[in-house]
Image (cartoon, rainbow, N blue to C red):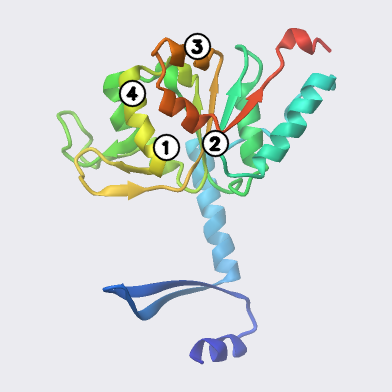
C-alpha cells in the first residue's frame, strides 16, 4: 500500500530493488532500495568510467572485424547468434586470427555488455601466482601480501565476461583450481574460508588441439567439456586473403 502511494505522489521514475528478509525459511519482511532513475544512471556512468580506467572493457565489436569472404561472414553470423546466449564459448584459431577481437565482440552483443570484460593470458600465468591473481587474497594471507588485500580477476569480472586466452597453455595443477569456479562459479579468497559466488560468462580461446591434449592427458577432460559447450572456429588468414 505505502509503495503504491509513494509512486503515486512522485513525478519521477523510480527503480526499486526488493530483497526479502528470511529467517528459518520464512519471509519476515522486505528490504527496499529505492532510487530515482537519474541517480541510477549516474551510478552506472561512474561504474563504467571506473571500468574504463582499469581497462576492464571490451573495446571492439563485430563492425571492427575486417573481411567479406564467405568464411569470415559465416563465422561472424554464428558468433553474433552465440553472443545472445549465456553459454561458455571456446574459440579455436591459429595465432594472429583475432581470437580476442571475437571474444570482445561476443561480449558486446550479449546481455552482459554493460558489465566488465576481463581478459587473462593463461600462458603467462605462473602456477604459484594463479590463486592470488584469479581469486585474490585477504590482508596477511601470506608473506609479502598487500596490507589491503587484493581483488581477484574472477571477482572483477562479476556480472560480465571473463576471457581465458590460450587456455591450452595452462598447467595441469592450474586446471584443477580453475575447474571448480567454472563448475559452480564459487571460489575462496586466500586467507578467507568463506566461499564467494560470482555471475560470469566464460569465453576461452586456444590455438592448440585440446582433444589431442585430452587424449595425451595433458589437458583435463572435465575442464574441456566445461569450456567447450559452444565452439567457434575462426578461419585462418590464408583462407581470407582479401
Q: Farthest residue toward the front?
A: 215
Q: From the viewer's side, name the closer residue of 158 and 150.
A: 158
Q: Earlier in the sequence, mark 3 or mark 1?
A: 1
**Which residue is drawn at the image coordinates 54% and 36% (left, top)?**
88
Q: Nearer the viewer, mark 3 or mark 4?
A: 3
Q: CA distance from mark 3 to mark 2?
A: 20 Å
Labels 2 & 1 near each other (Cβ < 8 A): yes
Q: Earlier in the sequence, mark 4 or mark 1?
A: 4
Which residue is tagged 4?
174
Residue 34 placed where, x, y %? 49, 75
**Which residue is drawn at the image coordinates 66% and 44% (left, top)?**
84
Labels 3 & 4 near each other (Cβ < 8 A): no
Which residue is tagged 3?
212
Location of residue 21 by image quarter: bottom left
Q: CA distance from mark 2 to mark 1?
A: 9 Å
Q: Earlier in the sequence, mark 2 or mark 4?
A: 2
Q: Secondary structure at mark 1?
A: helix
Q: CA distance from mark 2 to mark 4?
A: 19 Å
Q: Using residue 63 as the reference point, say whether residue 139 is left or right of it.
A: left
Q: CA distance from mark 4 to mark 1?
A: 13 Å
- Would you place residue 139 above or below residue 212 in this image? below
Q: Residues within 10 Å of mark 2 (few under 14, many from 20)?
A: many
Residue 74 placed where, x, y %? 79, 27
Which residue is tagged 1?
182
**Which residue is drawn at the image coordinates 30% and 37% (left, top)?**
136
Q: Earlier in the sequence, mark 3 or mark 2?
A: 2
Q: Nearer the viewer, mark 3 or mark 2?
A: 3
Which residue is tagged 2?
88
Q: CA distance from mark 3 to mark 4?
A: 19 Å
Q: Nearer the viewer, mark 3 or mark 1?
A: 3
Residue 232 placed where, x, y %? 65, 26
Amino acid at each position: 500500500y505505502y509503495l503504491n502511494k509513494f509512486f503515486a505522489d512522485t513525478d519521477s521514475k523510480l527503480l526499486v530493488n526488493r530483497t526479502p528478509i528470511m529467517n528459518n525459511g520464512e519471509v519476515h519482511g522486505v528490504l527496499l532500495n529505492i532510487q530515482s532513475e537519474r541517480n541510477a544512471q549516474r551510478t552506472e556512468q561512474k561504474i563504467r568510467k571506473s571500468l574504463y580506467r582499469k581497462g576492464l572493457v571490451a573495446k571492439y565489436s563485430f563492425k571492427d572485424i575486417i573481411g567479406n569472404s564467405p568464411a569470415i561472414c559465416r563465422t561472424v553470423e554464428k558468433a553474433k547468434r552465440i553472443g545472445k546466449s549465456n553459454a561458455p564459448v571456446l574459440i579455436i584459431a591459429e595465432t594472429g586470427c583475432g581470437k580476442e577481437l571475437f571474444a570482445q565482440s561476443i561480449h558486446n552483443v550479449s546481455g552482459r555488455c554493460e558489465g566488465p570484460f576481463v581478459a587473462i593470458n593463461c600462458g603467462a600465468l605462473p602456477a604459484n601466482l594463479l590463486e592470488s591473481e584469479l581469486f585474490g587474497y585477504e590482508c596477511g594471507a601470506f608473506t609479502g601480501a598487500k596490507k589491503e588485500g587484493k581483488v581477484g580477476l574472477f571477482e572483477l569480472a562479476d556480472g560480465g565476461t571473463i576471457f581465458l586466452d590460450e587456455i591450452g597453455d595452462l598447467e595441469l595443477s592450474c586446471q584443477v583450481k580453475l575447474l571448480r569456479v567454472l563448475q559452480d562459479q564459487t571460489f575462496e579468497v586466500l586467507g578467507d574460508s568463506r566461499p564467494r559466488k560470482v555471475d560470469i560468462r566464460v569465453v576461452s580461446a586456444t590455438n592448440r588441439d585440446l582433444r589431442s591434449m585430452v587424449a595425451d592427458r595433458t589437458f583435463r577432460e572435465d575442464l574441456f567439456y566445461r569450456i567447450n559447450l559452444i565452439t567457434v572456429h575462426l578461419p585462418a588468414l590464408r583462407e581470407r586473403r582479401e
